[in-house]
Image (tube, rainbow, N blue to C red):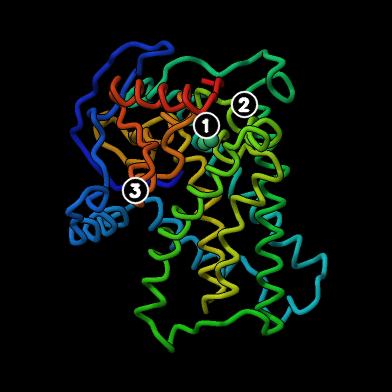
């Protein structure tokens, strides 16, 4: 779900028509793999790619800033969190509810309700399903909002509440800024990479047919995705997806890192599933803020490929990488036939 993102400009649009086998817009094929995907690996290019994924501006950087603001201005002080009390738990819950509503709702209104950038940089121009029994409430957007705002916000809050309670009671190793400021900052990048690594493996797990049929099917009802699709998951998938935050039980961290970890997992859902490569602001249709994730868009169309994301190239190493070309599509189809998977 996560992706490299930064401000870009001047990319040509390649209208190729809509439809099941076409894209309204897509990046250049084949999509490049990570610098450490092939031998000999290029670790310097890998580090540069990570830096470019953060700077000069990216959704990860904005979320890191948001997590700092959240800790100082919108979180209960730790002394209040020693006991589970409804007041500070409600404060976290309603703050998280507001954050997801603002990010996913804001993107949906801008891109789909008011269509402020038309189909510019839109991957798939087909409309969302408005009347289909496939979805909860018979409507794709209402379905996606329902699962995001009920189960998604609840489990996000639950993980954060337990972490705050554990920090308040000295049950989690605590990292202070003054102790190691360099590691304190690098930890944000490490969390992002670990989140990618963790996501690949839990995602492969829930593509195991019994778990897919009972849990992951809910997220995959969305072939054509929008901002609300990102966190539209079965409650068990929310738990598995957010469980990467348990790493802070082992690795000394500050509560800001936990808040960032959870906000990154949740708030990158709407951007990576936005269905648009770029958010074009103002009148400059060809300039904008890169936010979409074509790599994951391919996963939603072809299912058995691109389980992770492109910075940590596990898909490449395990033969599940789809670079957008017809050859890759054929490879994935053969792999699925051999495995007896029939859902694409
Ligand atoms: Zn998805
Ligand atoms: Zn999947």
Image: 120 above or below 246? above
Which numbered disc, 3 or 1, marks the residue that appears first in the sequence?
1
Queried on whether the Cβ of the residue with tag 2 lies below 8 angstroms from ligand 1, the answer reads no
Indicate which label's residue lies in the foreground, 3 or 2.
Answer: 3
**Residue 234 image position (x, y, % from top left):** 69, 39
Q: Nearer the viewer, residue 321 or 187?
A: 321
- Determine the CA span between mark 3 and mark 2: 31 Å
- Determine the CA span between mark 3 and mark 1: 30 Å
- Numbered circle sitting on residue 108: 1
- Residue designated by label 2: 141
Which numbered disc, 1 or 2, marks the residue that appears first in the sequence?
1
Residue occupying the point 81% across, 71% down: 84
Q: Examine the image and state in which quarter residue 189 appears.
A: bottom left
Q: Is residue 85 left or right of residue 327?
A: right
Within 10 Å of disc 3 (Cα), the crowding (few <14, some 14-19, many 20+) is: many
- Residue designated by label 3: 313
Image: 172 above or below 49? below
């Amino acid at each position: 779900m996560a992706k490299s993102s930064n401000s870009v400009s001047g990319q040509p649009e390649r209208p190729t028509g809509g439809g099941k086998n076409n894209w309204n817009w897509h990046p250049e094929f084949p999509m490049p793999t990570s610098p450490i995907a092939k031998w000999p690996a290029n670790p310097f290019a890998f580090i540069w790619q990570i830096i470019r994924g953060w700077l000069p501006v990216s959704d990860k950087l904005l979320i890191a800033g948001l997590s700092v603001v959240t800790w100082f201005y919108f979180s209960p002080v730790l002394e209040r969190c020693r006991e589970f009390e409804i007041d500070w738990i409600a404060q976290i819950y309603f703050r998280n509810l507001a954050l997801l509503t603002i990010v996913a709702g804001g993107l949906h209104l801008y891109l789909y309700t008011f269509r402020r950038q038309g189909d510019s940089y839109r991957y798939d121009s087909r409309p969302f399903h408005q009347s289909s029994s496939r979805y909860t409430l018979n409507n794709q957007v209402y379905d996606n909002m329902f699962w995001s705002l009920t189960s998604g916000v609840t489990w996000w809050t639950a993980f954060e509440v337990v972490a705050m309670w554990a920090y308040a009671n000295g049950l989690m190793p605590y990292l202070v800024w003054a102790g190691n400021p360099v590691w304190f900052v690098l930890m944000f990048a490490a969390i992002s990479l670990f989140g990618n690594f963790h996501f690949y493996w839990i995602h492969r797990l829930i593509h195991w047919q019994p778990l897919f049929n009972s849990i992951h099917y809910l997220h995959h009802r969305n072939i054509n995705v929008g901002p609300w699709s990102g966190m539209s998951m079965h409650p068990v998938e929310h738990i598995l997806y957010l469980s990467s935050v348990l790493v802070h039980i082992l690795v000394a961290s500050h509560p800001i890192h936990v808040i960032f970890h959870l906000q990154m997992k949740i708030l990158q859902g709407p951007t990576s599933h936005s269905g648009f490569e770029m958010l074009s602001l103002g009148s400059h249709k060809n300039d904008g803020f890169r936010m979409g994730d074509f790599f994951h868009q391919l996963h939603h169309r072809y299912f058995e490929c691109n389980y992770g994301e492109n910075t940590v190239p596990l898909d490449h190493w395990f033969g599940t990488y789809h670079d957008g070309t017809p050859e890759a599509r054929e490879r994935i189809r053969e792999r699925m036939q051999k495995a007896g998977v029939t859902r694409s």
